[in-house]
Image (cartoon, rainbow, N blue to C red):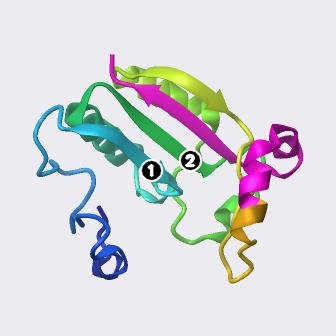
Amino acid sequence: MDLNPDCGKRIAGYSTFLHQDCSTTWPIEDGALDVVFTSNFLEHLPSKELVDKTLREAFRCLKRGGKIICLGPNIKFVPGSYWDYWDHFIPITEESIAEVLSLKGFKVTRKIDRFLPYTMSGGNNPPLIAVRLYLKIAFAWRFFGKQFLVIAEKP
């Protein structure tokens, strides 16, 4: 789901693309989804109200026991550079996303303050083997992790 129509071109043949505002009603039946995954996205919504509406839709569309997985830059660890992106509006930490998920009815099952490095974009993507190794060495997250990972489920 994205407002950018180019996104649909990139995922054609792999997934169904919904070209729409995520804070409006999703054209998905109640309880139809197993997982909702959001990565480096919620901080780009222009208001907390729109984050609330988006999470409400995710909750509605998830099955009982379905999971929402949220990744994003943790403003605690990138306070100045967080604002280097013109389209970052909402400062988020692992605590604040866990709180809003709880307020929307989710049960938080995992909360990691430091997970992935701040960015892996810009043409300097590491080889996939390095990413796999990094994910297996949780000790390294303390040094390089600047994004949170929060997983919650619909009770």
The mark found on residue 130 in the picture is: none
**Where 1 sits versus 141, above or below?**
below
| Residue pointed to by mark 1 | 38
> Which comes sooner in the sequence, label 1 or label 2?
1
Type of amino acid at the residue the image marks with label 2: Leu
Which residue does the image show at 47% across and 60% down from the upper left?
44
Quarter of image, res 80: bottom right
Stretch in magenta: 131-155
CB under 8 Å between callouts 1 and 2? yes
Name the foreground residue: 130 vs 139.
130
**Residue 71, numbered label:** 2
Amino acid, disc 1: Thr
Instruction: Tell me which residue sits at (13%, 34%) in the image.
Output: 30
Q: Is residue 15 above or below residue 75?
A: below
Q: Is-magenta flag for residue 42?
A: no
Is 77 on the left or on the right of 128, as rendered?
right
Q: What is the x, y in percent for residue 40? A: 53, 57
